[in-house]
Image (cartoon, rainbow, N blue to C red):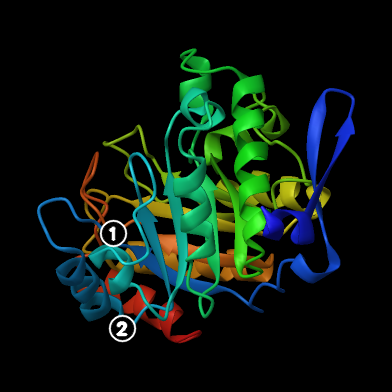
Amino acid sequence: MLAAALCCALVLSGATWLVVRSQSCQPADLPDGTSYGANISTAGITAEASMAQVDEAFGRVPIVRTFDPGMPLPWDAPRNQTVTGRDVVTSFRPMPQEVLSGSFDETFRAWFEQAPSDQTIYWSYIHEPEPLLDEGRFTQEQYFAAWEHLAEIAQSACRTNLHATLILTEFTASSPDRDYRDYDPGPEIIEVIAWDPYNGVFDPDRTFYQDPKSLLGPVVDIMEADGRPWGIAEVGSRLVAGDDGQRRAQWLTELGGYAETHDARFVLYFQSTRGANWRLDDPSSRRAWSEKVAERR
């Protein structure tokens, strides 16, 4: 508990505990510019093979998206060893009720303390929480309290390359019926907000690629008003009917350029068949994303 005493203090504001960072434990500056990368998947394939496939498709990516369906994998696990030397956007999903019970505190403390110091690590708790909240799996109060609890543990580890990152759906930005602040514990906890935009995610018969300004504009408007750094944790599009990949390639180039112009810190393509075939398997699309990746390799 000495680290917690040295690196972190808590103040009571109303009924909410806010994490106060000591001078020595202030987060390091985020990397300048926009990094481009992709996710790796271990569904039916090893992490090493998945990482090799991504690098073969796009060149060595400098940033990788990883997912844990429950608790985060230890840093010495093969998957995490595979992404050594690269920045990471990673998420895990134990329910708030479990986090708040305290039963995982030591596991989380070890995970934050043992995180590698030579990577920028954007860690996220329950990416895309909106449907789980809508379904009543937990309350907003429980979700925010769990975030605060994890942020306190992370702060006690005093690892300045760890950045608490909220990941939301693009629909939350574009829907008039949603307010992102309903899912945001606030700037005292969250350092970076990331988004998951897709071209026609629920429209498999779509025949066009949504203009990047139309797709990302609501996100950009929110983030310019909010002021915190932002990124794209997942982006994807099926190959629409009648396209051999050239139109998608142009869309990827324009989307990356729009995100970069508006200071996105990272843009990660969802190179997966989960839910649909989002993979960039055609030469034109691969070349386009490879060119974006190469800008920061």
- The answer to whether any part of residue 262 appears in the image is yes
Q: Percent from the top left, x then y, of residue 181?
A: 72, 32
* Neighbourhood count class around disc 1 (C-alpha, 10 Å): few under 14, some 14–19, many 20 upward: many
Q: Is residue 50 above or below residue 123?
A: below
Q: Percent from the top left, x then y, of residue 209?
A: 41, 51
Residue at the (68%, 67%) spot, across then down: 263
Q: Amino acid at mark 1?
A: Gln
In this view, the residue in front, 237 or 80, is 80
Helix, strand or loop at disc 1? Answer: loop
46 left or right of 280? left
Residue at the (46%, 27%) spot, across then down: 98
Tag 2 residue = 59
- Residue 271 has which mark? 1
The answer to which quarter of the image holds residue 55 is bottom left
Residue at the (69%, 48%) spot, across then down: 190
212 left or right of 77? right
Mark before the other along the chain sequence, 2 or 1: 2
In this view, the residue in front, 165 or 149, is 149
- Which quarter of the figure is the C terminus placed in? bottom left
